[in-house]
Image (tube, rainbow, N blue to C red):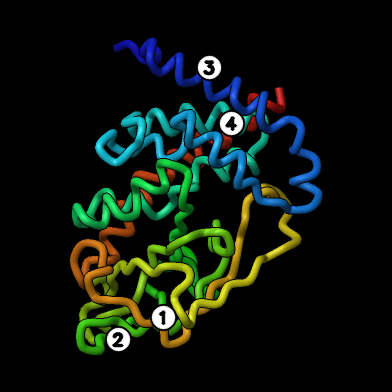
């Protein structure tokens, strides 16, 4: 079995590394010291097909799949993990929309991210529930054709810079443990959304990390991603598709150390 990259993937690898060298180098020290996010670099990356490279071409992505994202992430991380992460997670949360969302949701949310116009975030982790995905407490209560959301999310990547969140919510509290949750899209400018930057991280400091609070946040029920009550399983699938990126970060950083 041949594990070598295709010529197309090799070209993507070389382009990503050149981009990082050209665009990151001048800003690495300042962004790390001041914990500064890099929106302009993300926009340039989008113009080069490096943002949401996994996304199908129909929504403006490069159609490079999970392997392409891993290749890009490895090369960006060789230069700087913080700025590199800003690029590869500019679409974080959109993977779930691609897997389970409606066609209208894909066109509305994935396409602008691919163009570098919007940033997304996955609002999953909570102050008292990180790896315990079935322990989330943020509630989305049905009120007519809307959900009303209350709760807190913690350590959210892109938390204070994103344009919308994919939020894991408790929608069916009386159902069996793994059938209680649903994914809901929440625009960041919705009344009741409050966010605060978390500072003083040990590493990856150019990446934005925030705490997000939802207080009587009202969104239409059509913002549910996939099926109500299937959020736990959808999130597990989402993690399956995004965690190889973390391994690629470690690989790129290791190469940089050498």
| Residue with the mark numbered 4 | 76
Where residue 123 appears, as percent x and y from the top left, is 45, 65
| Residue with the mark numbered 3 | 14
- What's the CA distance linking mark 3 and mark 4? 10 Å
Q: Nearer the viewer, residue 99 or 147?
A: 147
Q: Is residue 193 above or below residue 188?
A: below
Q: Are marks 3 and 1 in contact (CB under 8 Å)?
A: no
Q: Residues within 10 Å of mark 1 (few under 14, many from 20)?
A: many
Q: Earlier in the sequence, mark 2 or mark 3?
A: 3
Q: Earlier in the sequence, mark 2 or mark 4?
A: 4
Where residue 67 appears, as percent x and y from the top left, is 38, 29
Q: Residues within 10 Å of mark 4 (few under 14, many from 20)?
A: many
| Residue with the mark numbered 2 | 141
Q: Is residue 66 left or right of residue 89?
A: left
Q: Is residue 32 left or right of residue 18?
A: right
Where residue 24 appears, as percent x and y from the top left, is 68, 33
């Amino acid at each position: 079995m041949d594990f070598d990259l295709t010529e197309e993937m090799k070209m993507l690898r070389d382009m990503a590394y050149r981009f990082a060298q050209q665009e990151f180098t001048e800003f690495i020290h300042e962004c790390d010291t001041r914990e500064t996010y890099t929106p302009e670099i993300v926009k340039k990356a989008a113009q080069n097909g490096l943002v949401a490279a996994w996304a199908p071409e129909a929504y403006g992505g490069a159609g490079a799949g999970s392997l392409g994202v891993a290749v890009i992430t490895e090369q960006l991380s060789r230069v700087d993990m913080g700025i590199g992460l800003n690029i590869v997670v500019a679409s974080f949360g959109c993977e779930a929309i691609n897997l389970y969302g409606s066609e209208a949701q894909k066109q509305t949310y994935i396409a602008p991210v691919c163009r570098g116009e919007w940033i997304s975030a996955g609002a999953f982790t909570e102050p008292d529930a990180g790896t315990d995905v079935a322990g989330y407490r943020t509630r989305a209560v049905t009120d007519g054709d809307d959900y009303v959301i209350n709760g807190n999310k913690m350590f959210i990547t892109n938390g204070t810079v994103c344009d919308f969140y994919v939020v894991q919510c408790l929608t069916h509290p009386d159902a069996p443990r793994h059938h209680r949750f649903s994914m809901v899209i929440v625009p960041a400018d919705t009344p009741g959304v409050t966010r605060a930057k978390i500072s003083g991280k040990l590493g990856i400091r150019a990446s934005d990390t925030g705490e997000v609070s939802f207080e009587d946040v009202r969104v239409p029920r059509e913002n549910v991603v996939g099926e109500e009550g299937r959020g736990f399983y959808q999130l597990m699938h989402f993690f399956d598709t995004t965690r190889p990126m973390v391994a690629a970060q470690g690989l790129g950083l290791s190469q940089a150390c050498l």
